[in-house]
């Protein structure tokens, strides 16, 4: 990818209408552009990162029996009325058509997926089933000032599973929980698992996956010894209390962002739609349903909140828009053009800065954009048939002979 051909440009100043680090840096670096509060376009580099995160999530869902589908975002009002959510869910966007019909925009898709999956489930032999999608969600959030952390339109992975009984749901929940932890690990994040109340319809416990960050909108207590963690909203404990789980640790307060969660929906949706299956005794039962959300665009914002310095973003390798940032400041471009071609042949994705700009400008942009590895070609390095390699998160650089470059990069 030639930097000169990107239709975006970096900005020296943070936009005045963005309050959070993630939005300021992502807008400045040309990853996203705000259309209105909570609604962003994803520009070439930003869309690459969003797709990288989505792909990691997809791989881990596929590895655990999830089947990917794509459901509509435009829903008839009737299905939302059937479950009571039309009146109860305050963030639901409601649309009236010119023929006076009511529609909703998907803020979650239980109402669509329950009748869909149960169309193909007749007996217990057809269970369990697990389907997921990755797509846009719409929510009429009152406050949307945290950049990608709280969108009115945002990118989410939502998975739904259907089980014969509670026990089988709990078995599957453990599998998904491990898959979530693996996803966060692959991205370079540590998530704490909290217990929280089950939301509008249920008094069941749900689990939230929290990444500690001051930009987050949740308040949690976590044990400094064991993995105990609880959302302050419902907690019986307070800061400084002894940990109720291990008895050794102390509970610390932290701000956090909920990057994912899992709900035990019980039999509610089967009952609401009166959709069941025949059990072993040929009796009708309602399936136990689980839902598992993961905020992909929120994750992108959280990554920037966690990984940046005063110069810009520092992408973890796994979600960087490209592998390498090649910068030429040599007076001639012949050698760097050749290296750009070679790196691509070697299957590296490269952002190549061959612009007619000052070295200072190129370095500042590279730091702002945050590709983890920078390769610099200058008249000085070329004299020795070399390039300078520098990791974005390090002050040290390394001179490497061009012949050995791909080997060094792979090491
Ligand atoms: P929150 O308490 O932050 O509003 P939620 O409990 O409403 O989240 P869910 O309905 O369970 O969240 O959605 C699943 C996941 O989608 C969340 O864990 C979060 O990562 C993400 N998410 C929810 N709301 C938003 C939003 N407005 N913008 C971006 N991501 C969101
Ligand atoms: Mg919410």
Image (spheres, helix red, strand yellow):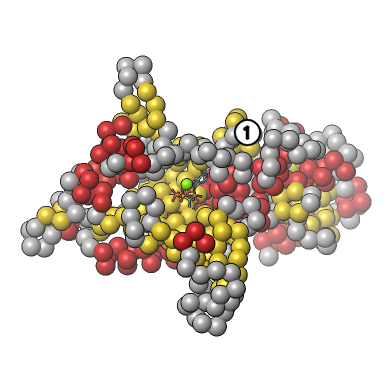
Q: Where is residue 306 in the image (x, y as percent from the top left)?
A: 66, 56
Place residue 266 in its image quadrant: bottom left
Q: Residue at position x 26%, y 64% from top?
A: 166
Give the number of callouts: 1
Which residue was labeled with disc 1? 34
- Answer few, some or many: residues within 10 Å of disc 1's Cα (few below 14, many 20 plus, some between 14 and 19): some
Judged from the image, the secondary structure of the residue bearing numbered disc 1 is strand
- Regarding residue 347, the answer to whether it shows in the image is no
Residue at 32% x, 67% y: name it: 171
* 1 w.r.t. 205: above or below: above
Observer able to see residue 217: yes
Is 171 situated left or right of 270 in this image?
Answer: right
Residue farthest toward the left in the current orientation of the protein: 282
Label 1 CB-ligand 1 distance < 8 A: no
Camera-nearest residue between 403 and 116? 116
Nearest the viewer among 321 and 136 is: 136
Q: Position of residue 167 (x, y in %)?
A: 26, 67
Which corner quadrant holds the C terminus? Answer: bottom right
The N terminus - image quarter: top right
Q: Looking at this view, is 201 or 69 the one in front? A: 201
Query: Which residue corresponds to the image point at 83% horizontal and 60% vertical from the top-left?
Result: 395
Estimate the x, y position of residue 29 in percent, counting from the top left.
72, 41
* Point 78% across, 61% down: residue: 394
Determine the residue located farthest toward the top in the rendered image. Answer: 98
Q: Residue 257: image x %, image y %?
A: 56, 55
């Amino acid at each position: 990818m030639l930097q000169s051909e990107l239709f975006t440009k970096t900005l020296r100043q943070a936009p005045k209408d963005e309050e959070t680090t993630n939005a300021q840096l992502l807008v400045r670096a040309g990853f996203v552009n705000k259309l209105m509060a909570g609604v962003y376009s994803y520009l070439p580099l930003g869309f690459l990162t969003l797709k990288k995160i989505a792909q990691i999530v997809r791989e881990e869902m596929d590895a655990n029996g999830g089947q990917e589908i794509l459901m509509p975002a435009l829903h008839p009002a009737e299905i939302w009325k059937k479950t009571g959510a039309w009146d109860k869910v305050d963030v639901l966007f409601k649309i009236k058509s010119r023929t006076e019909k009511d529609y909703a925009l998907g803020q979650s898709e239980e109402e669509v997926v329950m009748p869909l999956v149960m169309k193909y489930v007749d007996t217990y032999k057809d269970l369990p089933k697990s389907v997921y999608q990755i797509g846009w969600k719409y929510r009429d959030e009152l406050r949307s000032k945290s950049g990608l952390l709280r969108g009115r339109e945002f990118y989410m992975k939502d998975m739904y599973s259907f089980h014969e009984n509670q026990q089988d749901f709990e078995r599957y929940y453990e599998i998904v929980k491990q898959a979530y932890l693996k996803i966060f690990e692959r991205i370079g994040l540590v998530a704490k698992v909290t217990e929280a109340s089950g939301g509008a319809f249920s008094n069941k416990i749900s689990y939230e996956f929290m990444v500690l960050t001051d930009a987050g909108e949740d308040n949690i207590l976590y044990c400094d010894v064991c993995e105990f963690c609880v959302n302050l909203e419902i907690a019986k404990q307070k800061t400084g209390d002894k940990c109720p789980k291990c008895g050794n640790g102390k509970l610390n307060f932290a701000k956090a962002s909920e990057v994912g969660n899992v709900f035990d929906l019980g039999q509610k949706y089967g009952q609401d739609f009166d959709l069941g299956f025949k059990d072993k005794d040929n009796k009708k039962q309602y399936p136990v349903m689980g839902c598992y959300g993961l905020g992909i665009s929120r994750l992108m914002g959280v990554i920037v909140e966690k990984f940046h310095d005063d110069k810009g973003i520092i992408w973890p390798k796994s979600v960087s828009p490209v592998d390498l940032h090649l910068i030429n400041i040599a007076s001639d471009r012949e050698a760097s053009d050749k290296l750009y071609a070679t790196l691509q042949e070697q299957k590296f994705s490269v952002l190549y800065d061959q612009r007619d700009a000052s070295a200072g400008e190129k370095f500042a942009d590279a730091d702002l954009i945050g590709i983890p590895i920078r390769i610099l070609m200058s008249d000085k390095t070329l004299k020795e048939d070399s390039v300078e390699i520098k990791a974005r998160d390090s002050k040290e650089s390394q001179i490497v002979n061009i012949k050995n470059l791909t080997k060094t990069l792979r090491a």
